Amino acid sequence: MSEVYNSRTSERTDVALGGSLEPCATAMTSSLRIFLVDDEPPALNRLQDLLADCRSAVPHDLVGTALTGTEAIEKLVQHPADLVLTDINMPGMTGLELARHLGRLHHRPAVVFCTAFDEFAVQAFEVHALDYLLKPIRRERLEAALLRARDIAHPSQEVLGDLSPAPRRYFSVAERGRVRLVSVDAVIYLKAELKYVTLRTREAEFLLEESLTQLEVEFGNRFLRIHRNCLVAREKLLGFERGHDEGEGHWLALLDGSDEKLPVSRRQSHVVREFRRGELA
């Protein structure tokens, strides 16, 4: 089992995410295993009907459906798929963010996005060579996508990040060979250490294989840099106090949910003045 952390309740929700971070090299089975994700049940039903119409041309098995991204990840661990057809505009976790997390599973499925985006947005998908189905989906177009599914590569994290302007709602992190989703709301700070970034919540610490600079770009409105190697959650920042020495720890950041007092570098000492003036909200 795995866990989704939520700072609003200070509780952990068990979610079976499982799987290692190594890409899967296993070839698809003769019958394509398909998983569907859409937050609207009528859309799921229509897509299932269209799939049934395509079965004679493209043999496949429908291994599952989900109404949310987190539900999809949980089910895909138990029922691996070769192809995931996912809506993009979903509450909580978008289809683009879902694809980023699916890339961390042991069996990485190909992804085809179902979208009602306008022509300009669709061009972005074409530039990145990502397959998509424009809603309302036609049987002929779905059949063509299924026939190409075996050749579809899982989209890279960089491409998915470029296409998704909104910050992620979750981090996917590795622990003991499993993948966990940690709500961004639950994070107290992010601290760069050697090749990794330490992610701290009230309950635990995790390691991210991401760049602190890239995280600052993505979450600049949620996290504040207090040191060259540390970002703290703005909502968790309680204040500052003077340290006992006159070195780089002259000011220390006090954080809700942690007894640690993190040093503020001289270069970032302006955040103390801005906090006093109420300019960090």
Image (cartoon, rainbow, N blue to C red):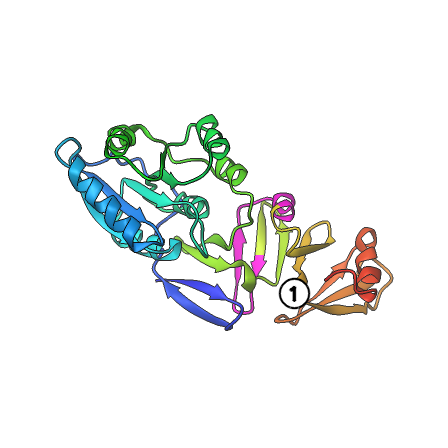
Nearer the observer, 97 or 108: 97
Residue at x-position 28% and y-position 50%: 44
Residue at x-position 40% and y-position 40%: 115
Per the rendered image, the range of residues in magenta is 199-217
Quarter of the figure with the C terminus = bottom right
Residue at x-position 52% and y-position 58%: 206
Task: Name the amino acid type tagged 1.
Answer: Glu
Picture quadrant of residue 272: bottom right
* For residue 33, above or below residue 264: above
- Outermost residue toward the right? 246
Decide whether residue 210 is among the magenta residues.
yes
* For residue 168, above or below residue 161: below
Q: Residues within 10 Å of mark 1 (few under 14, many from 20)?
A: some
Q: Is residue 189 left or right of residue 88?
A: right
State the image coordinates of residue 230 (x, y, percent, origin top left).
Answer: 68, 54
* For residue 1, above or below residue 133: below
- Outermost residue toward the left? 56
Residue at x-position 74% and y-position 53%: 227
Q: Is residue 138 left or right of residue 229?
A: left
Return the residue at label 1.
235
Secondary structure of the residue carrying tag 1 is: helix
State the image coordinates of residue 151 (x, y, percent, origin top left).
Answer: 30, 28
State the image coordinates of residue 152 (x, y, percent, origin top left).
Answer: 33, 31
Quarter of the figure with the N terminus = bottom left
